Image: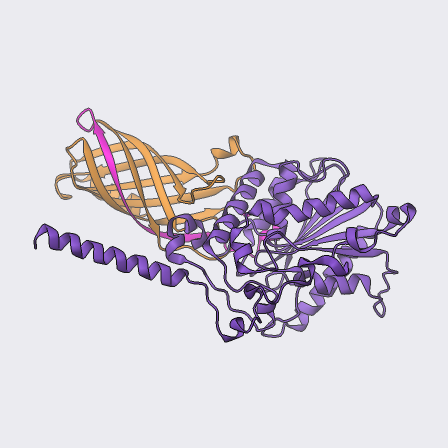
Amino acid sequence: MAILGFSALAAAEEGLWSVGMRAQGFYDFEPGQDWVLGPEIGYSNYYLGSHRLQLKGAYLTSRLEQAFRPNVLKQDYFLFSPVWHFNRNGLFDPSVQVDLGYMRYDLEYAFMDFADNDSWIAAAQVGFAINMFQGEYGLFYHFGYNFIVPEQTTLMQPGVFGLGLWMML
Amino acid sequence: MSLTAKTAWTCAGLALLALAACAINEAECDLECQKGFWMDSGQFPDPCSDDSNKTCLVSHRVPALSDSEKAVKNVLIAVHGFAASTFEWQEFKEFAEDTLPGYDTTHNTLVSLVLMGGHGTNLDAFRASSWKDWGKPIVTEYDTLVKQGYKNISFACASTGCALLMQFIADGWLGAGQAPKWIFMIDPIVVPSAKLLSLINLVGPILGNSPNRQSPEEERHFYVNQPQEDLKQLYELVNRVKNHLESGFELPRNTKAKVYKSKRDRSADPIGALLIYKGMRKSDGGHIEVEMLDSRLHVVTRLRARDPVPSAKDSLLQTRIFKEMIDKSLAGP
């Protein structure tokens, strides 16, 4: 809803739209990493801090990984991420961002019906982007801490990182 | 501020942080511990750490059985959890081997209490051990029993003991020859409830030693201090198991398994039961059995020395699980 709301507001102004892929995982240093992957859209305009503030929305899922590992849990993440760019026009662009959103996973079997299978997300992250071809294309990496991690029935962990790429529309 | 002053302040800050980290890392030892009443002290070792009295391992305990007796004897190898000791399965051993009113097992079941490597002795031995060390006595006892001629061997494991069994089965280290009959898993740990454990490699020096205070009697049978080295080993093990489960693996041919998992568990996240159900299949591709228990205890099969005293419902659960494990392992294929 938040993504749609901001998208509607953004549509009223002239701005820069981007589309890309984002992969996200948890910072655990060990094999067994759960990756979620999916599309991400971004929007900025002159009135949002001279394009320094970018609003991103992403849907990330582990369903693609099931092609390779059939027993991974089916997880879905819906994220809204305001990003502040410190050097939007430069090649190397440090950034800070907040991830706000919601995650859920399929319980699949009746014996798990007692479990809470969803959670809100609130994470703070720092990162950087590499702007190529005057910002037409780029790569990004960010890492940080998710402040909402339930103790029970979740694969979520506090340390979070993401990487991806985008192109301007 | 001059560069020299900045450098001096920076060095002082780093030194203070290092001191703070060392203070947190220091192993806790109160008066009870200093008197030797904690297992950590090394003065109160697990009785099975030196099995000279031959009361723990079935391979040591009853070598005098004839081959025909060994062939029909039902042996359950009981494997305890992280920082625990054979105390965790003592109640089950007594239940299975003693004649109980209304439930005479006719002494056909023997319980082999395996003490995991690095456990049950002292904190330094625990700190120096890896998860592979923890699991070696399990494989050794199983292989020895097979060599001695026992045909009906099953496992009962708790928490980290189950993670070790799954790791060994997935790697083909266990059951490649003679397969175990049943594997009963009590609160197997695949995903820890304490999610901060995932950052142990990053913040281990800050998190430090993580003492886990329990009832006075429990502190004689479980390590109170849990060094970061062991927490790292634990996290490496459970992540490997999770990886195996997500890729999928099969139990040895004809081996069956049942998972008993508490719905509310402060140590092992119940989501682990779902991962095991999906990822660990019988050799014919079928699912194993899973039962979610209406309990808040981690390893409900160990009720002795708990504080507060467990509920009557937990006692009933414990007895039912004990009977079910014995009945299933005694039953035909």
Colour chain A is painted in: orange
**Location of residue B305 (image quadrant):** bottom right
**B164 and A150: which is toward the camera:** B164
Q: Give yes or no for residue A132 being in the magenta stretch.
A: yes
Q: Is residue B266 above or below residue A44?
A: below
Residue A69 image point, x, y percent: 54, 34
Image quadrant holding the C terminus of chain A, namely: top left
Please say whether residue B55 is visible from this viewpoint. no
The magenta span reads A107-135
**B318 and B10: which is toward the camera:** B10
**B79 and A152: which is toward the camera:** B79
Please say whether residue A132 is visible from this viewpoint. yes
Residue at figure coordinates x 83%, y 68% from the top left? B100
Chain shaded purple: B
Residue at figure coordinates x 46%, y 54% from the top left? B228
Asked if residue B42 lies left or right of residue B15, the reply is right
**Location of residue A150 (image quadrant):** bottom left
Residue that lies at the very extreme toward the left in this rendered image: B1
Q: Is residue B302 above or below residue B261?
A: below
Residue B280 image point, x, y percent: 64, 41
Asked if residue B289 lies left or right of residue B119, the reply is right
